[in-house]
């Protein structure tokens, strides 16, 4: 069983979808720190790369090493276009995740996460992790298994309470069936009979019989409180090797404030004293932990270590480096705003259909703009953030507060829940250059997320150039290369 590497001071954030791609994770891991790939939506990333022709051949090189050749053959037959997809045409989709009868989607997720980890680990002996959202239950077992087939070293999971993940890792390491109990929304007047349904993965269904046991990766839950960390250490169904402690200034999904809901003049949730993690109690747990959320500076790293942390997790600084998966034109627009001092990040309590607050970068042409958001025709065709609900007949159904309003209401949802909800699934695919052209000819728009310390990127941009590398980020954080001082201090949890 793997133990957490207490010597790694930097964990590169697992930003999805595929912003934390294999190139970024490999660049960080090659330098002796922990590189992380995002496993969210990895089946869609795989099939869209294949439809774009896989021009460098990296995806097919990794697929050639995959231990279950039937899955590879089927994926190539269904999705690979040697000349690439014609401009303006619609991507063929991976099947939407579901609780049962979804072998094709599970197989593509296993293969996609394998490919990403394989490529991230290629050519060096460093350590690579995979980041997943607990809230995205349905594809997670397949993503975990595929990453383990490729020898992943760490699993990081937040946006929920991942109590069942350690036990699943134990079983998947032996190619044994694993299950997660489904979180189900119970509609008024609908009664439940029998045990709670599960989502399951049976490795032998994909050809694992006779395969040697796998390395069990170290598990690092992402938590927002010392009480949650303590509970997981005591009540999880297997071992935990450490924690990432994330504050509300981090990008992506944030934990909601504890206590009564209070909003500032811009409609952002207000965090208070109850949301501050007691680091002395984290030290008392006896496991290594890394601090996240505006810890992207050498000063913040030193303070974190002085408080007993093994180091820090940093996402935003890596998100805009040369190796990240962000589409270059989007990257350039944000860097221009950073240099010009106009960049802005808002914590939007409504954007995510999950109900978690979500950090949004104000970016022209993205659904951060009200007119772009309202002009988009609602569609739910990827389905990673759908909730599972109990239907009138006792069966289970799937719904999303970002889907067409009439559809959501027909499934027992309230119209008020749809207000301001944005389609993160499609927008995040646009962010990495894999955006969908819908059947009516409309192109999906991006929606970018970053932490509150986005302006700190200016520290990394040297005179005479408008880009920087993952190595520059590490040199800066570890204080090995002098970087010009910023125009002003960045204020945040870790600053």
Image (cartoon, grey):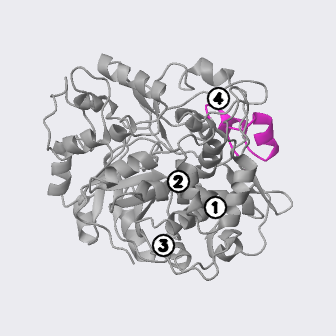
Q: Which residue is mark 3?
A: 166
Q: Earlier in the sequence, mark 1 or mark 3?
A: 3
Q: Are marks 3 and 4 in contact (CB under 8 Å)?
A: no
Judged by depth in the image, the label closer to the viewer, 1 or 3, is 3
Judged by depth in the image, the label closer to the viewer, 3 or 4, is 4
Gap between marks 3 and 4, in whole Å?
37 Å
Question: On the picture, is 433 further left or further right than 473?
Answer: right
In this rendering, the answer to whether 396 lies above or below 263 is below
Q: Earlier in the sequence, mark 3 or mark 4?
A: 3
Q: For residue 394, which quarter of the picture?
A: bottom right
Image quarter hosting the C terminus: top left
- Which label was assigned to residue 39? 2
Q: Earlier in the sequence, mark 1 or mark 2?
A: 2
Circle 3 — which element? helix
- Which label was assigned to residue 444? 4
Q: Are marks 1 and 2 in contact (CB under 8 Å)?
A: no
Give the residue drawn at x 64%, y 42%.
48
Q: Are marks 2 and 3 in contact (CB under 8 Å)?
A: no
Residue 156 drawn at (x, y percent): 43, 59
Question: On the picture, is 386 further left or further right than 123?
Answer: right
Camera-side residue: 163 or 426? 426
Question: Is 405 a magenta residue?
Answer: yes
Question: On the picture, is 336 further left or further right than 161?
Answer: left
Judged by depth in the image, the label closer to the viewer, 1 or 2, is 2
Judged by depth in the image, the label closer to the viewer, 1 or 4, is 4
Residue 45 drawn at (x, y percent): 59, 46
Magenta span of residues: 399-422
- Alpha-carbon neighbours of circle 4 within 10 Å: few (<14), some, or many (≥20)? many
Q: Earlier in the sequence, mark 2 or mark 3?
A: 2
Q: Which residue is mark 1?
A: 183
């Amino acid at each position: 069983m793997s133990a957490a590497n207490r010597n790694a001071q930097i964990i590169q954030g697992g930003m999805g979808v595929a912003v934390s791609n294999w190139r970024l994770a490999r660049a960080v891991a090659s330098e002796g720190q922990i590189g992380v790939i995002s496993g969210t939506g990895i089946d869609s990333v795989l099939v869209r790369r294949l439809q774009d022709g896989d021009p460098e051949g990296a995806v097919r090189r990794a697929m050639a090493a995959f231990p279950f050749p039937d899955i590879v053959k089927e994926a190539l037959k269904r999705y690979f276009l040697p000349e690439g997809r014609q401009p303006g045409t619609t991507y063929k989709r991976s099947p939407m995740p579901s609780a049962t009868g979804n072998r094709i989607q599970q197989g593509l997720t296993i293969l996609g996460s394998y490919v990403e980890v394989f490529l991230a680990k290629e050519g060096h002996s460093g350590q690579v992790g995979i980041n997943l959202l607990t809230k995205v239950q349905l594809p997670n077992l397949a993503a975990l298994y595929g990453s383990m087939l490729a020898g992943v070293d760490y699993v990081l999971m937040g946006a929920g309470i991942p109590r069942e993940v350690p036990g699943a890792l134990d079983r998947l390491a032996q190619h044994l069936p694993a299950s997660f109990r489904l979180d189900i929304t119970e509609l008024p007047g609908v009664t439940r009979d029998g045990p709670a349904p599960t989502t399951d993965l049976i490795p032998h269904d994909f050809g694992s019989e006779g395969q040697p046991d796998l390395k069990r990766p170290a598990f690092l839950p992402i938590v927002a409180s010392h009480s949650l960390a303590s509970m997981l250490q005591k009540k999880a169904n297997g071992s935990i090797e450490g924690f990432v402690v994330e504050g509300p200034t981090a990008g992506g999904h944030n934990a909601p404030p504890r206590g009564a809901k209070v909003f500032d003049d811009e409609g952002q949730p207000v965090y208070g004293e109850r949301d501050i993690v007691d680091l002395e109690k984290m030290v008392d747990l006896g496991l290594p932990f890394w601090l996240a959320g505006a810890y992207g500076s050498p000063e913040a790293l030193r303070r974190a270590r002085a408080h007993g942390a093994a180091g820090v997790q940093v996402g935003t600084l890596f998100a805009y480096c040369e190796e990240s998966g962000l589409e270059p034109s989007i990257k350039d627009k944000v860097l221009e705003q950073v240099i010009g001092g106009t960049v802005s990040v808002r914590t939007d309590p409504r954007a995510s259909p999950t109900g978690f607050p979500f950090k949004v970068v104000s970016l022209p042409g993205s659904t951060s703009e009200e007119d772009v958001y309202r002009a988009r025709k609602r569609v739910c065709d990827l389905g990673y953030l759908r909730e599972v609900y109990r239907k009138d007949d006792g069966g289970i159904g799937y719904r999303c507060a970002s889907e067409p309003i009439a559809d959501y209401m027909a499934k027992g949802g309230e119209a008020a829940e749809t207000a301001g909800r944005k389609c993160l699934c499609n927008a995040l695919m646009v962010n990495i250059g894999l955006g969908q052209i819908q059947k009516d000819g409309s192109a999906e728009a991006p929606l970018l997320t970053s932490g509150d310390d986005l302006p700190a990127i200016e520290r990394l941009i040297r005179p005479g150039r408008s880009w920087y590398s993952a190595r520059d980020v590490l040199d800066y954080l570890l204080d090995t290369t002098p970087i010009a001082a910023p125009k002003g201090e960045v204020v945040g949890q870790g600053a």
